[in-house]
Image (cartoon, rainbow, N blue to C red):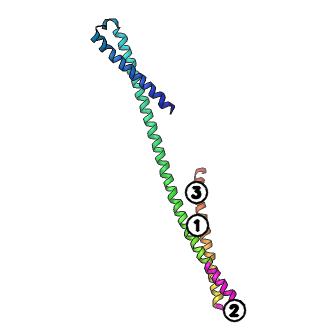
Amino acid sequence: MADFTDLEQRLAYALERIATATEGPARDAAGGAAGAGDPSASSIEVDVLKAELEAERSANAQLTERVRAIKEKQETLLTALERKVQTLSAQLEQQGGELQRQRLMNVSLTRTNQKLSDSLREGVADPGVLNEALRTEVEAMRLSRMAEMAEMEEILAELRPLVGEVA
């Protein structure tokens, strides 16, 4: 930011000197005092001012290029962050679905285990209730495994870019 302020001051000073130099000969011609100044000194001063103006234009062009580069970098970063947010949102949705399925499966497993417990208390071993309990438990294990695989895939997705950077 200090660069901008410094350049702005230099540019203002150069423009002030140009205005003074261009007003001076016009004033001299109008006032009849043109013979007092040295024309070669005025020409040298104008050349110096032109050189300063060109230097300021060059500095301005460089600053414009730097601003453009920063803007491109910010846009690239913003695009990458937007992609990351989309990925994380999709993962969150998937995890939410998995969590909901596991909750439903836990409720079903609890009911089935209650039926199995009730039938054992009654002294009747119902093979249908036993099969249902086993099926429910296997399904719960399958859902748990799917959740673990999804979590593992998330971890691998985070590690892949890091491994790529090292390799």
Residue marked by disc 3: 160
Q: Give the range drawn in magenta.
A: 107-127
The first of marks 1 and 2 along the sequence is 2
Would residue 82 be found to the left or right of residue 150 on screen? left
How many other residues sit within 10 Å of disc 3, few (<14), some (14-19) or many (≥20)? few
Magenta residue check for 117: yes
Q: Nearer the viewer, residue 114 or 58?
A: 114
In the displayed structure, would residue 52 be above or below residue 88?
above
Quadrant for residue 139, please give it.
bottom right
Query: According to the image, label 2 marks what residue?
Result: 125
- Report helix, strand or loop for mark 2: loop
Give the vertical position of 56 relative to 105 (above or below).
Answer: above
Position in image of residue 142 (x %, y %): 61, 75
Point out the tag, 3 or 1, that comes first from the N-terminus: 1
In front of the other: 104 or 50: 104
At x 64% / y 76%, what residue is drawn?
A: 141
The numbered mark, 2 or 3, whose residue comes first in the sequence reads 2
Please tell me whether residue 96 belongs to the stretch shown in magenta.
no
Distance from label 2 to label 3 (Cα)?
52 Å
In the picture shown, does residue 132 fall above or below 167? below
Tag 2: amino acid: Ala
Work out which residue is located at the far top of the displayed protein and give it. Answer: 35
Which dot marks residue 150? 1
